[in-house]
Amino acid sequence: MMIVLGIESSCDETAVALVNSEGVILAQALATQRDDHAPYGGVVPEIAARAHLAQIDRLYTKALDDAKLTIDAVDAIAVTAGPGLIGGVIVGVMLGKALAAAAQKPLIAVNHLEGHALTVRLTDQVAFPYFLLLISGGHCQQLVVRGVGDYVRLGTTRDDALGEAFDKCAKMLGLPYPGGPELEAAARNGNPKAYSFPHPMSGDRGCDFSFSGLKTAVRLTIEREVARAGELTPQIVADVAASFQATVVAILAERVGNGLSMATLGYPVTAVAVAGGVAANQAIGEGLRSLAAQHDLPFVAAPPALCTDNAAMIAWAGLERFRLGLIDDASFEPRARWPLTELARA
């Protein structure tokens, strides 16, 4: 049995985890930076990098202690090498390289997006190839996952990522950071038919997304309602949140429907999977589950704790690559941008 230690520091979560080849998470130590960034309403890169630096050594020690292991028991070190906020990525990469050199362990540079993409294989043993909707604060893509390092991108966003749209709309509604979960909570008390918002790219037969027009419509609606009511009341907040979320679900049904039709024409996909932080949204999950059923495919989503940034997914992606002999030397550089389609099973 193999054990891989994973390190994640690409945005505002610092995490170290140990995962074995049977898909068991032996330990995961994580520190969130929500309180650090909350006063600014979003992630401040320099604050994030400093927080990673302050926490990462402690989390490494804690993960090993929680698993009751030493570094000698680890077969390889996997670390997020990008994409992400470059300062944070550098912190993790430097620890990974140092550990690999000191303990003489193989080193694996993991693409953060591949960590998300392969999570359903950790949790549900999904067989290749499968359809994947990757939705997070920085990414919104439809993909066919043909294998480790082997991705076909069917569509992407032309402007905002979906998580970004959630966060920006939440901020306009005066909801606290991080906005996505707060907007989902507010939507539970609202009327999803209270406001009619546009469906960008409706009728387009492709697989791309656009959310900037929807975001603008939300802003104009909020301004109009505040002018009418004199303030942003809790009911207005709830109704706008519910209407925005319902619109997103409808947009995904159309755009992902197109993607699924394209995917199933070209590949014998085994499942419809969703990954990334926005995948934790229950309304979106139910909409995608219904869409998968229409295509007679199982729907798979990782548990919410493994949808957001975490080191278990990095350890697992590292393990998948390690099995194939995809090992890196210490010369690789951290990357702020690293498209999944640049990976290769060489």
Image (cartoon, grey):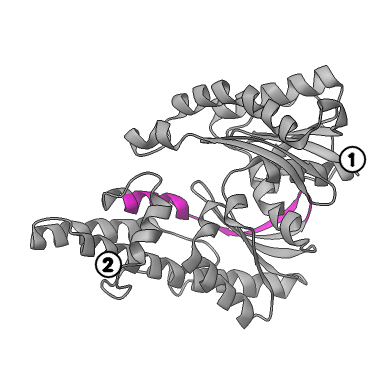
Q: Position of residue 280 (x, y in %)?
A: 53, 58
Q: Amino acid at mark 2?
A: Asp
Please rate how many residues cluster around mark 2, counting C-alpha atoms within 10 Å: few if below 14, some from 14 to 19, many from 20: many
Residue 239 numbered tag: 2
Is residue 156 one of those drawn in magenta?
yes
Residue 124, above or below 110:
below
**Residue that appears at 51% across and 73% down:** 253
Q: Position of residue 318 (x, y in %)?
A: 78, 41
Residue 54 left/right relative to 119: left
Residue at the image point whose x is 43% and y is 49% from the top? 164
147 or 183, nearer to the observer: 183
Seen in the image, is 251 located left or right of residue 57?
left
The image's mark for residue 325 is 1
Determine which quarter of the picture holds residue 190.
bottom left
Quarter the C terminus occupies: top right
SS category of the residue bearing label 1 = loop
Q: Indicate which disc, 1 or 2, sits on the residue closer to the N terminus.
A: 2
| Image coordinates for residue 131, horizontal then vertical, percent | 68, 65
Q: Which residues are magenta?
A: 147-170
Q: Residues within 10 Å of mark 1 (few under 14, many from 20)?
A: few
